[in-house]
Every structure is written in C-alpha cells, then in structure tokens.
Image (tube, rainbow, N blue to C red):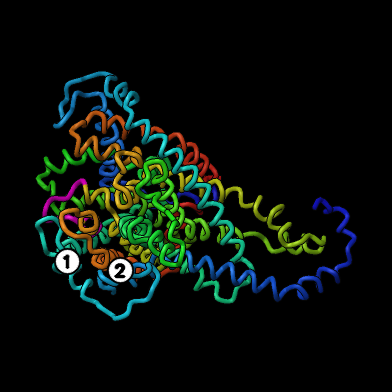
C-alpha cells in the first residue's frame, strides 16, 4: 500500500466511479457465492426430498448422512483417491520437472506432451481410459494376445479395485500440471546457489535432494492445495470412468451429492453432503488464502 | 552419502572432468526415461485415434495398440451426425453447437468484467477493496456442489432453467472470480506512475483504461480467454445439472453416448466422439500452449 500511494485524492470528482463500476460484479458474485452457500445450508436442514420444501427439519439430514453406508463409502473412497492422486501426481510431476531441468534440447516438445491431458475434459479422457481398462477388449485382451493367456486386469469392474483405476487416470491427467508448477519453481531458483554447491563438490542428485527440492517448499504447499481441491471436487472423472460403480463402490462425495440431489429425490441429504464438502474445502483453503493475501500485502 | 564436509576438499577439476566422462550414458538414460514417459502420456491419445479409425471386427480381433489395416473414417461421421443415444440418433453435432453457443458469450463477458474488476482492484483501490477481493476469491475454490440446488431454483424463477441462457449465466458467475484474479495480478505489475502521468494529463477512469491499460493487456487477455474457454468447454457438472433436452453441452452428449446401454457397443464411434469433443481445447492448447500454462500456474503461484 505504501509503495502505491492512493491515486483517488487527486481527483475526488471520480472517486465514486470505480466503486460503481465493480459494484454489479461484486453484488452478483457475492450473491452467487455466499447467498447460495447459505441457501444450500438451509436446504440441508430442511425437509426437502423430491422437491424443495422449506419446512425446518433440524439436523436430521446430517444424522442420516453420517449414518448412511453409501456416504461412508464415498468419504473413504475420497480418502483413498486423494492420497493416491496427490501422492502420485506430486511424485511423478516432481520427477518429470527434475528430469526436464537437465538442459534437454527438445524440452518444449516434451513439456507439451506431458501437459496436454490438462487441456482435455475428464469426460474425454475418462471415456478413453474406460475403453483401455475394460477387461473385454482393453489391456487385458491385448496382453493375452501377446502370449499371456492367463493375464487378468479387471480392476475397473472389481468393486475393491475400481477406485485405483480412477486414481491412475487422475494421476495421468494431472502429473503434467504438477510438473509445470515445479519446473517454474526450479527455474526461479537463483543459479548462484547451485554454482556454490557445485564448487563445494556436491553431486547433482545431492544438490537437488538437499538444496533445490527443499527450497521448493512453497510450491509444494500450493500444489498440494490445488490437488486436494481437485480431488474433493472430482466428479467428471468418476462419472465417465465408472459412474460410481460397480454398485456404489467408486462413489465420491461429489457423485453422492449429485445422485441424492438430482436422481434419488433426497434433496436435503444432497445439500447436507455439499455443505460437508464445503466445510472440508474451507478448512484447507481459507488458511491458505489468508496467508497468501497477507504475504502479497507485505 | 553423508560426506558433504569431506568432499569440500575435492579439487574442482574432479567435478569438471567427472561429469563429462560419464555424461554420454547418463544422457542416454535420461533421454530413454523422458521418452518412455512421453509414451505413457501419449498412449491413451494414440489408442483413441487408432481405435476411432478401425472397424469393430478389427477391434474385437486385434490388439489395443495395433495400427489399423485400413483407414476407415466412417466412425467419425457417425459420431458427428448419426450415432444414437437412446432413441435420439443425431450424433454429437447438436451438443457441439450447444457448447459453442454457451462458451462464446460466457467467455467474452466474464473476460470483459474480469478485466474491469482487475483494473479497479489494482489501480483504483478503495477502502476495503482488498477484503472484497479476498471474499470473491473464495469463489475460485469453493466446491460447486454447494450452488447446484439453489441455483436450479434461481434459474427456474428467472425462467431460463434447462436453457442455454441458464448455462451461460452460471458459467459467467462462476468464472468471474477467476478472471478478476487474472487481471488484478497482471495489472498490479503495471507501474502506478503510468496511471498518475495520464491523470496529470487530464485523462479519466475510462480513458486511462482504454488508452493506456488495455493496449498493454494483450497477453493476459489471451490467457484469460484460453483459460475460460477450456474451463467452460470441458465443464460437465453444470452441463449435466442445468441443461435440458436441447441445451446439453458436448461433454454431456459424449458421456451419454459412451454410456448408452441400449445398443451394441461401438468403441470406434465412442473414441471418435471423444476426440471430436476434445478437439477444440486440444487445438487451442497446441496453438497457444504457452498462454494455457500461464493460466494454469496463475491460479497456484500468485504474484
């Protein structure tokens, strides 16, 4: 603030104009964000079933939600998926970033290849993965054709394993994004640190492991933030790959919310699960946003 | 391993000659690993393309990775205009045009509003504007499930439920926090002296924006347009919740097509449909990848 002295006092005549200009955006934006959050919260304690019903029902929907087997499965699935997805994307993305950081001649081409899944809809890539992972004609069929007649790979239709397929497709989609973030972070590190370490005789892996990667801590932090946020919201990928099945074995909170609210006629349960999702995201994101904004102010 | 202090004494020549001698096989290994990963990322795309130009007989008989015997583009035509979802046999075409009709206004309006908001929030700060911005920023992160139920009521009251207009409105509102963030961070880097000098010359709020700020904004406008285009084109959640029979976007059309159970499964048509649905964003990515990456990283690494 102190470096950018306020401009408006010079021309008090138009002081109101900037406020007026952003007012519609902010009013609509806040209505959309906070108005609907509150409205949804009211739905979650109402007696709404097939149709919205504004009769107050107390915390009963929440009790039903937490007692529901299906929601428990969905939450557990999210925990498994988020762990694999975040861990896998971070590991693969970091590895790719470090490898690409070695003055590769065609780095641009490789980067483009690693990152292109991010430009595609999860529905598009989910359709492709569904075809690749299907036991009938996909990988299983192909490997058997190579002379391994007993090879089986039926995770996609196995209720215990299908969630891993969702994680594989998710990692494939997002690893390039993590790579881009880490690569930007690595390029931002002062060269003199590396030179100094080389002069000290440190080997290249050691320089990365002990100096460069630790200095990427803020990038780790924001990447985990973004990835966990993607994980909690993941809806498209599950819908395209398994539609929550077999049964509801790959249900996640986002798909649970959708089916309760829009196909099962349990609006208050759907609203309650959306509120739980919001609370989870807020618990992760609000401290992050707070610290980000405080640090940019300084 | 823990010889950091002892290697201190190692002469510098060792580190200079050491790498160059073992360089070649290490470089080869590095290249092999990088290319193997490229294969991993390209494999699904390859399988999609190859499958889309095979006949069903060939798909059943052969391997996933095998090249097609003959080039048969009939699945593409079928996916575009005659493939059936249930009883409706008009292919992906109507959904594709719905997406186009949703994307264009939603992208343009959210970019324009984001630009103006960003201009005010960076160059015409007022008391409380930072807090307002922080509150708006939460919209980038909130799980959209929260807005689905109330928004469908709002759209009903506005009389635009199940229509293209409803989807445009929702995407517009949903995109606003992100576009504002893009422009605010970009304009924050423009020197304030520029604005002050123009004010001394008697230029006002709009004149400064149009004459000075806008001409400097080309990169961020491109980033924002590409980002919004990709987001809205690829959206599925809003599409599936807020669309009606004749306003479904292409992602919903594709998903219904690929998951339709009524007819014999035609994987070649599914793959062609998936490619058609993915082609616009893929094309933008290939042409303007640099800007796409900037948009991606802007959300995570803020300046």
Foreground residue among B129 and A61: A61
First reached walking from the N terminus: tag 1 or tag 2: 2
Give the percent coordinates (x, y) of residue A275: 33, 32
Q: Residue at x 32, y 50 (%)?
A: A236
Please name whichever residue, B176 or B233, is drawn nearer the observer in this view of the structure: B233
B225 on left or right of A213: left
Q: Nearer the viewer, residue A252 or A245?
A: A245
**Count the marks: how many?**
2
Picture layout, residue A218 above or below residue B295: above
Asked if residue A199 lies in the magenta stretch, the reply is: no
**Residue plotted at (44% across, 53% down):** A168
Residue B126 picture quarter: top left
Q: Is residue A92 left or right of residue B261?
A: right
Magenta-highlighted residues: B241-252
The subunit carrying tag 2 is B
Within-10-Å neighbours for mark 1: few <14, some 14–19, many 20+: some
- Determine whether A293 is above or below A180 in the image: above
Which chain letter matches label 1? B
Per the rendering, the mark at residue B93 is 1
| Residue in the picture at 13% in, 52% down | B163
Res. A65 image quadrant: top left
Residue B37 x, y percent position in the rendering: 52, 65
Residue B251 within the segment the image draws in magenta: yes
Marking on residue A285: none
Q: Residue at x 19, y 47 (%)?
A: B242
Query: Quick check: can you spot residue A16?
Result: no
Residue A46 percent across, percent down from the top left:
21, 24
Disc 2: which residue:
B59
Figure check: A110 above or below A51: below
């Amino acid at each position: 603030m102190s470096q950018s002295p306020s401009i408006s006092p010079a021309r008090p005549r138009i002081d109101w104009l900037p406020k007026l200009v952003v007012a519609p955006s902010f009013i609509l934006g806040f209505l959309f964000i906070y108005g609907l959050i509150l409205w949804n919260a009211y739905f979650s304690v109402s007696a709404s079933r097939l149709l919205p019903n504004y009769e107050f029902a107390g915390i009963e929907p929440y009790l039903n939600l937490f007692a529901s087997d299906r929601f428990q499965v969905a939450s557990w699935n999210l925990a498994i998926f988020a762990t694999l997805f975040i861990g896998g994307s971070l590991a693969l993305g970091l590895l790719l970033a470090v490898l690409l950081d070695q003055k590769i001649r065609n780095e641009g081409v490789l980067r483009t290849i690693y990152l292109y899944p991010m430009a595609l809809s999860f529905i598009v890539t989910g359709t492709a993965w569904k075809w690749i992972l299907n036991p009938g004609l996909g990988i299983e069929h192909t490997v058997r054709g190579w002379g391994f007649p007993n090879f089986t790979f039926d995770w996609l239709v196995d209720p215990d394993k299908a969630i891993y397929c969702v994680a594989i497709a998710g990692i494939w989609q997002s690893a390039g994004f993590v790579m881009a973030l880490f690569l930007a972070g690595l390029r931002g590190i002062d060269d003199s640190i590396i030179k100094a370490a080389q002069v000290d005789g440190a080997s290249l892996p050691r320089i990365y492991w002990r100096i460069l990667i630790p200095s990427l801590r803020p990038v780790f932090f924001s990447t985990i933030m973004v990835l966990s946020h993607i994980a909690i919201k993941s809806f498209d990928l599950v819908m395209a790959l398994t539609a929550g099945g077999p049964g509801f074995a790959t249900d996640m909170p986002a798909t649970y919310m959708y089916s309760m609210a829009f196909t099962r006629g349990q609006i208050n349960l759907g609203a309650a699960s959306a509120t739980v999702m919001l609370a989870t995201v807020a618990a992760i994101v609000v401290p992050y946003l707070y610290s980000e904004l405080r640090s940019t102010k300084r | 391993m823990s010889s950091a202090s002892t290697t201190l004494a190692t002469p510098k020549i060792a580190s200079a000659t050491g790498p160059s001698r073992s360089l070649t096989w290490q470089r080869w290994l590095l290249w092999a690993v990088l290319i193997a990963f490229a294969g991993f990322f390209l494999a699904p795309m390859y399988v999609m393309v190859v499958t889309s130009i095979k006949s069903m007989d060939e798909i059943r008989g052969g391997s996933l990775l095998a090249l097609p015997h003959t080039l048969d583009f009939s699945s593409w035509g079928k996916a575009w205009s005659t493939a059936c979802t249930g009883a409706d046999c008009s292919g992906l075409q109507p959904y594709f045009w719905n997406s186009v009709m949703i994307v264009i206004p939603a992208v343009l309006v959210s970019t324009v509003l984001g630009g103006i908001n960003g201009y005010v929030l960076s160059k015409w700060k007022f008391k409380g504007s930072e807090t307002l911005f922080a509150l708006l920023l939460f919209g980038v992160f909130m799980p959209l499930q929260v807005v689905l139920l109330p928004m469908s009521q709002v759209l009903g009251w506005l009389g635009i439920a199940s229509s293209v207009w409803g989807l445009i409105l929702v995407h517009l509102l949903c995109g606003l926090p992100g576009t504002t963030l893009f422009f605010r961070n970009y304009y924050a880097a423009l020197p304030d002296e520029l604005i002050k000098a123009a004010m001394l010359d008697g230029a006002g709020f709009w004149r400064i924006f149009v004459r000075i700020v806008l001409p400097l904004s080309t990169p961020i406008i491109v980033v924002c347009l590409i980002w919004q285009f990709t987001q809205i084109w690829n959206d599925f959640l809003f599409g599936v919740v807020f669309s009606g029979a004749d306003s479904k976007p292409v992602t919903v059309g594709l998903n219904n097509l690929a998951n339709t159970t009524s007819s014999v499964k035609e994987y070649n048509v599914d793959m062609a449909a998936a490619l058609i649905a993915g082609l616009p964003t893929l094309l933008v990515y290939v042409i303007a990848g640099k800007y796409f990456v900037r948009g991606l990283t802007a959300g995570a690494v803020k300046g």
